[in-house]
Amino acid sequence: MITIRAAGAADAAGIQAVYAPYVAASPATFEEELPGVEELRARMEAAPRKPWLVAETDGELVGYAYASAHHSRASYRWSADTSVYLAASVHRRGLGRRRYDLLLPEVRALGYLHVFAGITLPNAASVALHTAVGFEQTGLYRDVGYRLGAWRDVAFFALALTSPLPTRPVEPRPWAPAAD
Ligand SMILES: CC(C)(COP(=O)(O)OP(=O)(O)OC[C@H]1O[C@@H](n2cnc3c(N)ncnc32)[C@H](O)[C@@H]1OP(=O)(O)O)[C@@H](O)C(=O)NCCC(=O)NCCS
């Protein structure tokens, strides 16, 4: 059985193991060096803290999804980026969808108003997943990164979490998972 739950600091090593093959051999990420466990913990706890969820099967961490800052400048603070990674063994079983169906309401409940995802093309699975949960493509940067021997295009996808937008937004709150 596959369970999805809030991630804690102890999950950083499992998250690193899922991420490692993508850093090594996939243009899905533009990160070229595998981040260490401490670095991943720091990302998970970066202020203001944002949701990280993990998927487990029989106690083994097989995937994760998380929100991160869209941009460091202050006026971007109601926007978040989201990302999902799954071990290849559990692709296309509805897990990406299930994690987004849990992650997006958590992000919305914290006061974020828009989420964004950058997808290196081609990535049929990621485009299909983001479209299935309501994202729309809003931009395309051609040849924006050189990764694994080729120039790569990145499509930008966006999803409004609240409509209409408030004229005076309240400050987003930090994520505080129940397990803490
Ligand atoms: C992208 C990823 C998270 C998708 O997760 P997943 O669990 O395999 O996807 P799901 O089974 O939840 O499918 C979600 C939707 O995408 C569709 N889909 C999934 N894989 C697909 C594929 N290879 N081609 C076309 N459509 C696909 C499904 O049919 C489903 O659509 P529906 O809800 O309309 O039926 C997963 O493939 C992955 O981890 N890929 C490698 C890392 C990566 O690229 N991450 C994204 C970085 S932007």
Image: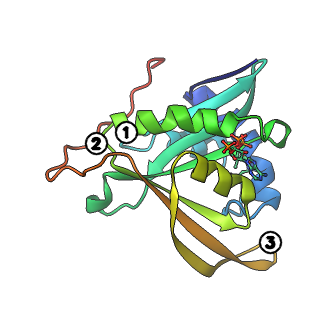
> At x 51% / y 59%, what residue is drawn?
136
Q: Dot 2 surroundings within 10 Å: few (below 14), some, or many (20 or more)? A: some
Foreground mark, 1 or 2?
1
Going by the numbered disc 2, the residue's amino acid type is Pro
Depth check, mark 2 against mark 3: the one in front is: 2
State the CA–CA distance, disc 2 to disc 3. 37 Å
Residue ID at (50%, 36%): 103
Pointer 1 or 2: first along the chain: 1
Disc 1 from disc 2: Cα separation? 9 Å
Above/below status of 147 relative to 78: below
**Is residue 165 toward the left or the right of residue 79 in the image?**
left
Above or below: residue 10 compared with residue 78 = above
Spot occupied by residue 76 in the image (x, y as percentages of width and height): 32, 59
Of 167 and 11, nearer the camera is 167
Foreground residue among 49 and 137? 137
Q: Amino acid at mark 3?
A: Leu
Please give the residue where the numbered disc 1 appears in the rendered image: 108
Marks 1 and 3: which is nearer the front?
1
Within-10-Å neighbours for mark 1: few <14, some 14–19, many 20+: some
Answer yes or no: is residue 105 visible: yes
What amino acid type is highlighted by mark number 1? Arg
Q: Which residue is mark 3?
A: 148
Which of the two labelled residues, at mark 2 and mark 3, occupies the earlier sequence position?
3
| Label 1 SS | helix
- Residue 8 in percent (x, y) is at 55, 27
Which residue is the site of mark 2? 172
